[in-house]
Amino acid sequence: MADHIRHVGLLGYPVGHSLSPAMQNAAFQAVGLAWEYVLLSVAPPSLQEAVLALRENGFAGANVTIPHKQAVLPFLHELSDEAEAIGAVNTLVIEGERLLGYNTDAYGFRQALVEAEFTPTSNHAVLLGAGGASRAVLYALLSQGVSVTLVNRTADKAFALARHFRPFFAETIEVVRYEEIEALQNVLNTADLLVNTTSLGMAPHHDTSPLASTLRLGAHLTVYDLVYTPRDTQLLQQARTAGAKTIDGMGMLLHQGTEAFRLWTHREAPVAVMRTALESAIISGKAVPPV
Ligand code: ATR
């Protein structure tokens, strides 16, 4: 690595299919920064060593992805309010000796809603999934005054997520079991937003949907799928057929990245350049899960 180049990296395991190098390196080039975004494949037992090595090697920061988003917390000096509330970090900033943890996933989720000009009507969302991605989305919704119904194959994980967030928010968080189709239909009839945070529908299983085909969607709903490979998922096709509005997963991916760029460089992110870089990386088929 040449001395004059500043580095940021992605800590994950695996990391091979990430789209972030394409997006961030295009951004650095566009603003004239001699920076480089590199992939760092780090197995769980080596995480602490890898985080310390970033600092020793002069990295400006890093993104953190599966399976390290929660495991990295003990090695950090300070967390942003959002990272603290979500309980997970996807962005590290290194300031001298200090390791600072942020979570830009919630920002990415909110920004994609803004770009889609989503206008809440009932302030009630249905959230499919209770994994890592779900935590940031749930926080983003609750902190905007939205009540949430959680649905997950493993109900215990949804109950645990609800218990984690309830003390901090006045909004209702309820859990509907995966097999309670009628209860879920009732909620879908009144909610204004349905968000998929599960991996169902992701290539190579693009012919699957997280939603039973017997469930009816309607024009009152906006359906937001975090999956971005493919961008047009089976769920989004179901939604369009029902007359619902749709939001694909690219906006959240883009904007978790634009916010990370700002945190590392203290400059405005070249959003259009980053969007184009992501779009061409997706089209070229670079992103084959897991990401
Ligand atoms: P991420 O960090 O991307 O959210 P994760 O933490 O592994 O990944 O969570 C994956 C989510 O997809 C979970 O909600 C998972 O449901 P379980 O908690 O029951 O495992 C959901 N998911 C994955 N495969 C699924 C399947 N075949 N059917 C239903 N839900 C599935």
Image (tube, rainbow, N blue to C red):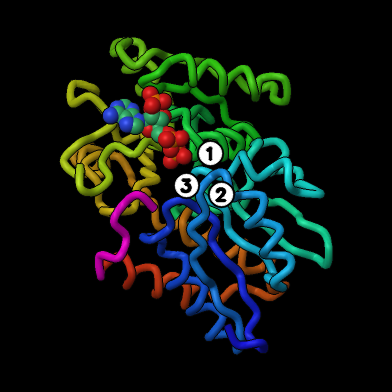
| Three-letter code, disc 3 | Phe
**Among the 4 quarters of the image, the one containing residue 200:** top left
Q: Quadrant of the N terminus?
A: bottom right
Spatial CA distance of label 1 from label 3 is 15 Å
Q: Secondary structure at mark 1?
A: helix
Q: Is residue 52 above or below residue 59?
A: above
The region drawn magenta spans 284-291
- Disc nearest the viewer among 3 and 2: 2
Q: Amino acid at mark 1?
A: Val
User: For the stretch drawn in magenta, what is the main secondary structure?
Assistant: loop
**Which residue matches tag 1?**
137
Q: Which residue is mark 3?
A: 118
Q: Residues within 10 Å of mark 3 (few under 14, many from 20)?
A: some
Question: In front here: 120 or 109?
Answer: 109
Alpha-carbon span between mark 3 and mark 2: 18 Å
- Residue beneath disc 2: 105
Residue at the (62%, 17%) spot, across then down: 163
- Please check the rendered image and state whether residue 152 is part of the magenta-colored stretch, yes or no: no
Q: Verify whether residue 287 appears in magenta.
A: yes
One can see residue 37 in this view: yes
Q: As displayed, is residue 35 above or below residue 44?
A: below
Q: Residue at x 61, y 39 (%)?
A: 70
Give percent across and percent down for residue 262.
66, 68
Q: Residue at x 30, y 39 (%)?
A: 244
Task: Give yes or no for contact between labels 1 and 2 (Cβ–Cβ under 8 Å).
Answer: yes
Label 1 to label 2: alpha-carbon separation: 8 Å
Q: Is residue 186 left or right of residue 261?
A: left
